[in-house]
Structure formats: C-alpha cells, structure tokens
Amino acid sequence: MGYVCSNWWRCKGTAYEPGIDDQTKIARLMDEIKKLKNENDNLKEIKYKLEEQLGILPF
C-alpha cells in the first residue's frame, strides 16, 4: 500500500497523474516543455560564458 501512495504523490500535479483529462495532460506537458526550454537556454548561456572565460571560442 505504501508504494501505491508514494507513487501517486510523485505523479500528482504532473501530466502523468491518474484520472486527469487529456486537456489537462496537454496543458501540463506544454508547461513542462516551456520550463525545460528556459532551463536549456540558461544552461547554454552559462556554457558560453564559461567557454569565453577559458578562451574556448564557440564556432
């Protein structure tokens, strides 16, 4: 019983939460994609700055 409960908490609020409709799943996935794109942009900026500090110029 503990596994089922902990698994439910892990999925709660995500697109993988059982019992939510397709529209809610899509909205949650779109939000997740947006957040991941922002994180990717931030990481690219950090990488560029570090390469610049090391004297490694990107192409």
Image (cartoon, rainbow, N blue to C red):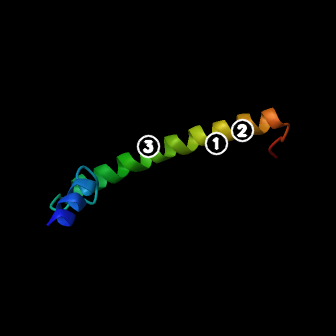
Image coords of residue 45 (percent x, y):
65, 37
Q: What's the CA distance linking mark 3 and mark 1?
A: 14 Å
Q: Residue at x 43, y 44 (%)?
A: 34
User: As rendered, which of 47 and 9 lies closer to the eye?
Assistant: 9
Percent position (x, y) of residue 32? Answer: 39, 49
Q: Residues within 10 Å of mark 1 (few under 14, many from 20)?
A: few
CA separation in Å, label 1 and label 2: 6 Å
Mark 3 nearby-residue class (10 Å; few <14, some 14–19, many ≥20): few
Q: Are marks 1 and 2 in contact (CB under 8 Å)?
A: yes
The span from disc 2 to disc 3 (Cα, nearest Å) is: 20 Å
Front position in the image: 51 or 23:
51
Q: Do tag 3 and tag 1 residues touch (Cβ < 8 Å)?
A: no
Residue occupying the far front of the picture: 2
Q: Which residue is mark 1?
A: 44
Circle 3 is placed at which residue position? 35
What amino acid is found at the position of numbered circle 2 in the picture? Tyr
